[in-house]
Structures are given as C-alpha cells and as structure tokens.
Amino acid sequence: MKILVLNAGSSSQKSFLYELPGELSGELPDPPEPLWEGAIDWTVEPGKAAIKVEANGKVLKEIVPSISQTEATTQLLRTLWQGETQVLKTLSEIDAVGHRVVHGGTEYRESVRVTQEVKAAIAHLANFAPIHNPINLEGIETVEKILGTEIPQVAVFDTAFHAHLPPAVYVYPGPYHWLEAGIRRYGFHGTSHKYCSERAAQLLGRDLPDLRLITCHLGNGCSLAAIRDGYSVDTTMGFTPLDGLMMGSRSGSLDPGILIYLMRNNGYTADELDHMLNKESGLKGISGVGVDMRQILAEIEKGNDRAKLAFDMYIHHLKAAIGSMLADLDRLDAIVFTAGVGENVPLVRALACQIFDFLGVKIDSEKNNSRPVDVDISTPDSKVRVLVIHTQEDWAIAQQCWRLMREDSNR
C-alpha cells in the first residue's frame, strides 16, 4: 500500500511517499525510509521557490520563479512518475493521501476521511488558524485536481491529540461567552506529541496508558504536553500557536496588558501586533540575531549579551513550563525532547533537566552529547527517564491513514 503525505506550512511544504503493508491487520513496522521525498521552500530566495526531490538514490534541486502553492505542488508531484526520481508507473498506485491540518476545532477529535463537509469545516476553522488552514485546504484541493476524487484523502488534525483536555484546562478565565464563541485552549503540535508518546512507550517497553510523560517539542515553534493515560491532559499552546513557551520568533505567553498599553499609547493595530508577536519576538526579538539556536549559541561565544539574555530566557521559560506540566501528573516516568532544538542541542536538554535533580532526573552527559536519536540519555540510577526522539510527523500521518483505512475495511 502506498500512501502520499502532504505537510503544508506557511512558507514551506514537505511531501513523502511511504510503502506500508498491504494487509490491513496486525501492527505497523518501525518508521521506514520513504520511497520518495519532496520539499518546497519559499524562503530560500526572495520571489523564488526552491524545489528538492530525493528518490532512487538521486537528488533533484531546482530554483523556480515563485509560483502558487497549487502550481508548485503540481510540479513537485509530477516527479513521482516522471524523470530520474520516478517511483510510480501510474497515479493509480497511490492508495491514499494524508494531510496535516492545523486546526480541527472541537468538531474533529480524530483523523477523518476528507469529504465536502470536512473541507467546509477546515475552511470555517480558518478563522482560528488563518495562516495554516487555508494552505492545508489548498493542498487537499490540489490533490483532487491531480489525482481525482476517487483516491481517499485523510485530514490529520494537529489539535486532535489535545481533544481530551479537561474543562479546567481548556476554558480561559474570561467571560463565559468566550467559550460559547469557541475561544478556548486547543493545543497544537498534536501529531508530534502523539507520535513521540507512542515511540517513548516502545523504547521503554511499557504500555502507553501506564506512562506519565512530558513531551517537549522544541523547534522554531515550541510546545509541551503532559500525557496521562495515553492522552494529552495539559499543553502550553492555547487558542493559537502563539501561546506558551518563548519560541524562535513568537513571544509565547505574556501579560495581555502590554498589548492594551501598546494600542492605547503607541497606536498599534491588530495586524501590527500580530506581526510583532509572531514574527519579531522570541529568540529573534531579544537577541537581534535570528531564530536559529545555533546562531544564538555562536553569538554567545563571541560575547553577545543580547544573545545570552535570549538563551537564558528561553531556558527559564522551558523549565517553568516543565514544572507546570508536572502539576497535572501524579508522577513522572519520562521527559521527552524532540524537534529541531530538542533533538540537536544538548545544552538545552542538560539545563532544562538540571533543575529537576530533586526528582531524581539525571542525564548521562556522554550520551547527551553523542547526537542521540531515539535514545534514553538518562543514567541507570535516574528515577525519571530522559528520551531524545526524532519526531516523524509525516510517518505518523501515514500511520493514521493506514489505521483509518483498516477501520473502514472492518466495518
């Protein structure tokens, strides 16, 4: 069975073709290498799109004038059955297409087959995720144009894993009519948190419902989740992905009175505040260097005080958030680090865990500094395991497609 995955973002798109067992029974294997991998990046050069494809041991790279997502996706997918990267003879070999969709609201608590009703809901929920949901929907409609409507498509919602948050967690302490209007904590990065929790259970040889985990997704966007009984019971992101931790260019949580002050005294508009908080804050805003943690650490070595302040703030907010997640767990079995920073910056892992030595958290410094992938980096006598897991959101989307098709076949 061949499953195509489209993971579309605001400035880039990743696509993968996986081959999964054709028999819709049993368990899936560990993450395989994709048959084909494609990417589009609109940030490499102004006014241009960078297309990269890997398949059959070959790499195709091309810079083209900036074109629409639909045109770029069409051009990218054409390499599945044409040229040196061809892995398919016909489009009919694709059995399903899975899409990451950022916002599923309260309506979608699981992955679903795409229908006209689902497409309409994704469009409606663009009110809550105006940057992402329209792009996700465009990806779905592009695939319909290329592959037709007979091949099933699956929407995998970022918010779904957090659908079990208790009301005391997801309701904001504003007027009750906020909740009635859909203003509540939704949580994001759910596909990553779900995958990492399941992978943690595998690595620990434990049943997921028996584990108490804190998963730390630390990339350009950052979020934590407290996982109990196999579900997310608390998370740092809220109504939007802007809430919670200090991030690459996002502020994370701050005093809302600051925004009122800026509007009243400096005349800021909603769009200006949106841009400032999402694009010019966080590590970038404080350091003046950028969003890349490697650049921040390099500048600290040069004696850059602003870079040092940004890093210290990042660690402070991370430690505080881990502490807040503890409040929703009756014990802690493991802390999981994943995504770009979580997987690749040993210093962040070491400093984040250091403060929790009173809980018996102990990191093996040699393991921590050895580029671990899906590895327990804690010492043998640590009372809490510390795992570094390579998040594979795209494989997780393919898994969701396979499982949904299995459920459909068993009905």
Image (cartoon, grey):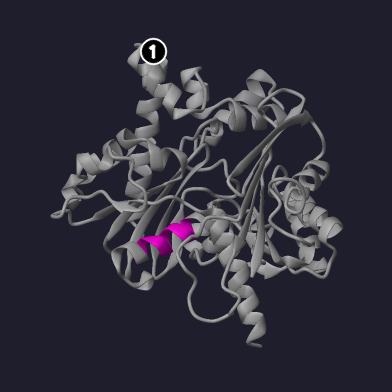
Which of these two is toward me, 30 or 251? 30
Residue 84, horizontal then vertical, whole percent = 70, 45
Write the residue at 29% across / 57% down: 334
The number of callouts visible is 1
Write the residue at 48% across / 40% down: 219
Write the residue at 34% across / 73% down: 207
Q: Dot 1: what SS?
A: loop
Residue 351, horizontal then vertical, whole percent = 28, 36
Q: Main secondary structure of the magenta part?
A: helix
Image height of 23 relative to 211, above or below: below
Q: Residue furthest left?
A: 381
Write the residue at 64% across / 20% down: 265
The residue stretch that appears in magenta: 193-201
Image height of 315 relative to 3, above or below: above
The residue carrying mark 1 is: 304
Q: Amino acid at mark 1?
A: Asn
Q: Does residue 321 appear in the picture of this structure?
A: yes
Position of the C terminus by quadrant: bottom right
Residue 160, horizontal then vertical, whole percent = 58, 63
Q: Does residue 104 appear in the picture of this structure?
A: no
Position of the N terminus by quadrant: bottom right
Magenta region includes residue 103: no
